[in-house]
Amino acid sequence: MGYAMSRLEIDSNLCDDEKNTSEFGQSHRHSKPLNHLEHDIAHATKRRSEPHEHLAKVLPGKRAVPVSPVKMLAGRESNFSGRGRFMRRDCCHVLHRYLPVNGPWLVDQMNSRAYISQFSSDGSLFVAGFQGGTIRIYDVDRGWKVQKNILAKSLRWTITDTTLSPDQRFLVYTSMSPIVQIVNIGSAVTESLANEIHEGLDFSADDDWGYSFEIFSVKFSTDGRELVAGSSDDAIYVYDLERNKRSLRISAHKSDVNTVCFADESGHLIYSGSDDNFCKVWDRRCLKAKGKPAGVLIGHLEGITFIDSRGDGRYLISNGKDQTIKLWDIRKIHQGFRRYEWDYRWMDYPPQARDLKHPSDQSLATYKGHSVLRTLIRCYFSPAYSTGQKYIYTGSKDSCIYVYDLVSGAIVARLEHHKATVRDCSWHPYYPMLVSSSWDGDVIRWEFPGNGEAPAPLTEKHMNR
């Protein structure tokens, strides 16, 4: 079953006494903090999740953190902040302590490995992709009813990635093919057959002479006009949806490009991660003139399986086959090296390599405890709205979901239920809810309801950002 360190399971009585709750499971081998981050991002994260200074003062000249919700409500009613309401940082201070660790509750079960878990940007929809070629879109607010059941077209091996358009009208999915499929999910028809409403977007070009490659990762731009993809031919592709053609190909790495994403809303910066161990930053504004990456981030000893951007054009995290997550500031670049030859698809990571550190490691922090084997396991920042991006979370080969504190590096939650590799998981953008998908075929929901019982379906309107 799932659990979290009890210092995050907030007891209202202890909070009212302004005391920190005791640590649970100090003997647990993963409970010791791995590092303590002293950097701009640490201070920014704290500012996002600490209450207004006037709400934090319990006595003149004294400051208490954490501050109980009762005292914060009293401070709001007395207008201590001078705003007459809670600020976003005040909300984060309350919400970030309630981790989605209760459960599990079954969302769906298939006789096929689950590869994809993704909430839409507003949390109203959830996408799950399975190796057998089924993609299901669930209406979260209507009791997780299946809104669209999609049968993949021209499936090769598995669904490798999916991405929803910003307006949530279209779903794009990839397979082991240069053809990316786009589906209109706004239609009223629940069953979406592969030969009916799918449209293929060809990422190859006329001069490729029939050369075939595989796409592992695809993401929409914030404006919904472009797609960026990473492929098995060591390249990054950008597809212009308005012109319906490939607009850019970058010979980016010396091995498979497993993961790509846009750095921020501008669409100018692209992050990529590869089996050559490098994370790279590409600035499209100067790409034609230089033909080189704007920066190379070095520190992983093995290939990169996934990258997630903080959305600010500066920070990102990467999951690596060296069994670590690393936090990066793109202003730091260097060179890299490789030490061991092994295949993560069927071999365990060499035990003697677990404590190695790259001599030129430029990452800000390293997070250890989970296992990255067999597949491209993904990692993410926790939501900005409810947690201030205070946490990092990931699936794992050992069938668990891990949640790390971004600043301290400590494992604050380890969720246990699945019987096979957890490839992907997704935290609801507003509620303390997390959904995981595993190779055991289960899609599982974890939450933090107040009474520990199964929560009722969400029916309220989502809050505006």
Image (tube, grey):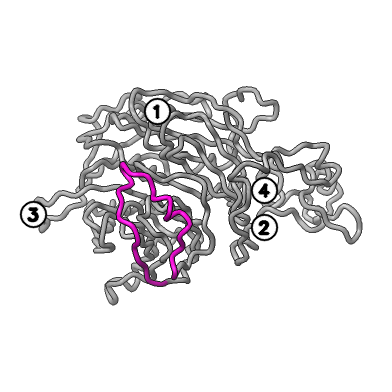
Quadrant where the N terminus is found in the figure:
top right
Distance between mark 2 and mark 3 Cα atoms: 53 Å
Based on the displayed image, in which of its 4 quarters is residue 13 positioned? top right
Assign a secondary structure to mark 1: loop
For label 4, the residue is: 92
Distance between mark 1 and mark 4 Cα atoms: 34 Å
Image position, residue 281 (x, y; %): 38, 65
Around disc 3, counting alpha carbons within 10 Å, would you say few (fewer than 14), some (14 to 19), or many (20 or more)?
few
408 sits to left or right of 132: right
User: Tag 3 or tag 2, which sits nearer the N-term?
Assistant: 2
| Nearest to the observer: residue 381 or residue 135 | 381
User: Tag 2 or tag 4, which sits nearer the N-term?
Assistant: 2
Amino acid carrying mark 3 in the image = Trp
Inspect the magenta stretch and tell me whether residue 327 lies in it.
no
- Asked if residue 240 shows in the view, the reply is no
User: Tag 4 or tag 1, which sits nearer the N-term?
Assistant: 4
- Please say if the residues under marks 1 and 4 sit with CB atoms less than 8 Å apart: no
Q: Give, as a single range, the part of the protein colored magenta.
A: 334-360
Based on the displayed image, in which of its 4 quarters is residue 73 positioned? top right
Distance between mark 2 and mark 1 Cα atoms: 37 Å
User: Tag 4 or tag 3, which sits nearer the N-term?
Assistant: 4
Assign a secondary structure to mark 4: helix
Amino acid carrying mark 1 in the image = Asp
Distance between mark 1 and mark 3 Cα atoms: 39 Å
For label 2, the residue is: 46
For label 3, the residue is: 209
For label 1, the residue is: 440
